[in-house]
Image (cartoon, grey):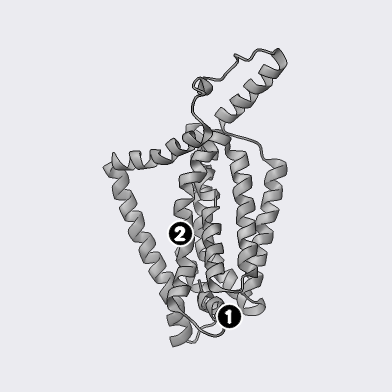
Amino acid sequence: MPIANRIVYDLDDGRVSKSSSVLLVTIWELGEAAGPLFIAPMSEVFGRYPVVNWATVLFILATVLAAMSESTPVFIAARALTGLSVTSNVLSPAIVGDMFPTDQRGKPISLIALAPLLGGSIGPALAGAIAETMGWRKVLWLAAFLALACELVFLTCSRETYKVTILRRRATRLRKETGNPRLRTLFDMDDRKSPLRKVAECAFRPAAVFSGSSVLQGMSLYGAIMFSYYYVYSTTLPDILQQLYGLSPAQTGLTFISFSK
């Protein structure tokens, strides 16, 4: 966020478009809003493990594309893909629900909620300092490297947590071992639905829940207003601090630490 104008300036040969710099920052949220509509249903059909892996690989590739981009439209498209492929905010609470009983989920969920809060406050400060000294592309290469390291850890240390997928794999193994093709899980009694139809049904489920819950509608409205203020703040404050007060990108990034309070 503190370096959005600098990125647009570099990619557009010295021209700075305010609409491009704002879109560069906010397009992430569009991808992050659309991603859960597909990521969550696919995790219920194919399991958490493959969806997290494929989405993380897409995140790494999109980040590399952003680091190598030579035009603003390509960079904005890469940013949209990175937002679309973020699975941590979507599947982390579900994975906690898979692993912990109801009365033991408080601490893990709190840690998960803390991560994006710290990222939104400390991230701009670190990115501003790195971009000021080494360039904004190094920030993206560092992000891609960290994501790749996390993916390697996940591949080697994590296992499937979704009980439906685990039971389906166990039933498949038992069918092979016993030769009994009638062995099925309770969740596979109706095999007439294709995976695509199952994903579509799961994707429309949030809309059905949203339309029938006034509490959820109120909370969503509150969240929309808060995100609107946040992005108005994050896209206008850097210009004020850098142009009016002469702060550097690193100093501007430090102002976002206030979001952690």
Q: Nearer the viewer, residue 39 or 159?
A: 39
Quarter of the image for the C terminus: give it: bottom left
Q: What mark, if any, has residue 29 been given in the picture?
A: 2
Give the left or right position of residue 123, taking residue 210 as reference.
right
Mark 2: amino acid: Glu
- Looking at the picture, how far across and down is residue 22, in whole percent? 44, 71
Compared with residue 177, is residue 114 higher up or lower down, i.e. above or below? below
Q: Determine the residue positioned at 60% across, 15% down.
A: 183
Number of disc labels: 2
Which residue is denoted by mark 1 in the rendering?
10
Q: Secondary structure at mark 1?
A: helix
Q: What is the CA distance from the residue labelled 1 to the residue labelled 2? A: 23 Å
Compared with residue 212, is residue 123 higher up or lower down, i.e. above or below? below
Q: Determine the residue positioned at 36% across, 65% down.
A: 229
Q: Nearer the viewer, mark 1 or mark 2?
A: 1
Q: Secondary structure at mark 2?
A: helix
Classed neighbour count for the residue bearing mark 2: other residues with Cα under 10 Å, few (<14), some (14–19), many (≥20): some
Q: Nearer the viewer, residue 74 or 31?
A: 74
Q: Is residue 100 visible?
A: no
Mark 1: amino acid: Asp
- Looking at the picture, how far across and down is residue 231, in whole percent? 41, 67
Classed neighbour count for the residue bearing mark 1: other residues with Cα under 10 Å, few (<14), some (14–19), many (≥20): some
